[in-house]
Amino acid sequence: MATFVVKPIVPDFVGEISDFPIHAIDEQLAADLRKAWTTYPVLRFRNVPMGDAEQVALTKALGPIFLTTNVQHGRREDSPEIFVIANKKNPDGSPMGDLGDGEVQWHTDHWWIEKPPSAALLRALEVPPTGGNTYWANMYSAYSALPESMKARLRGLYIHHQDVLDISGAPRCGKEMPTSEDFATWSGVDHPIVVRHPDSGKPCLYLGASRERQAIVGMKQDEANKLLEQLWRHATSPAHVWHQEWKPGDMMIWDNRCLLHRRDQFDPQSVRLMHRTTAGGERPVAAL
Ligand SMILES: O=C(O)CCC(=O)C(=O)O
Ligand SMILES: [Fe+2]
């Protein structure tokens, strides 16, 4: 029977797989992978030879393919499941992918929609000699490390995630700038601050992204800003964070429901080319 071993890098957070029988994916192997991924929300595949077809097959083992919507340059006509994240240029000088060479701040993918994706898979084709590392913050450990008084305070609280401006502060496609400066009145979605993970059943923090443009439902903005500042600082503190220094061929799978991630900038003269796939998810459910 096809099987694999997960080597812990950080217990209950990051694991590594180097013997995955990628060409033998069946129901049982997919179920074993989902189980491993429930224990290790960040999984590194290293030395597992993989192309786009294998990456798409792995994505489908985790959930239905989710087509990333806000793509500028990174859509591939021949394989729409692949979203190219790159600063590399096409022969005609046009960008091959999205996100360039800059820092990408802490976020959860697609946090402003009702049903954010469950799984993200990112595979390195070309990497710069330094920089461009990717970081994950564990929202299970961030939640469990909160004082009991804070856990009680978060009961029943929802963040209003506005969907007008993106993480860089630019208006999203088709969105008009509202006249009011009160984010609570902007269009968007409300997600619980503490969610219950649908597979593990464990509570975790769910902060989304763009702290400076978040509101808490029913709370004065001054008070919400103080609470959000405190939660973001806690959740992204080094105790809950691990980072990946990429080697060509590495593929990371992560769970978008219980992690935040960010990436470092890198030298614009160097090249970074990644292929990204995504699996769909359900609406986050309150744990408290
Ligand atoms: O380029 C990276 O390392 C991560 C980019 C990112 O935020 C993503 O793939 O969701
Ligand atoms: Fe992301």
Image: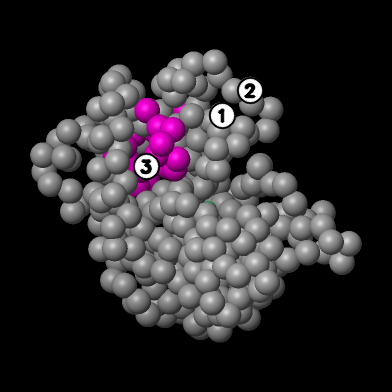
Colour treatment of the image:
one colour
Marks 1 and 3 close (CB-CB < 8 Å): no
From the image, tell me which residue sits under label 2: 176
Q: Position of residue 48 (x, y in %)?
A: 57, 80
Q: Residue at x 47, y 52 (%)?
A: 105
Q: Position of residue 191 (x, y in %)?
A: 39, 33
The quarter of the displayed image where residue 214 is located? top left
Q: Nearer the viewer, mark 1 or mark 3?
A: 1
From the image, tell me which residue sits under label 1: 164
Q: Residue at x 40, y 39 (%)?
A: 211
Q: Is 165 in front, or is 77?
A: 165
Earlier-in-chain disc, 2 versus 1: 1
Q: Amino acid at mark 1?
A: Val
Q: Report crowding for label 1: few under 14, some 14 to 19, many 20 or more residues within 10 A (C-alpha).
A: many
**Residue 121, labelled with which disc?**
none
Q: Position of residue 29 (x, y in %)?
A: 50, 69
Q: Is 234 in front, or is 202?
A: 234
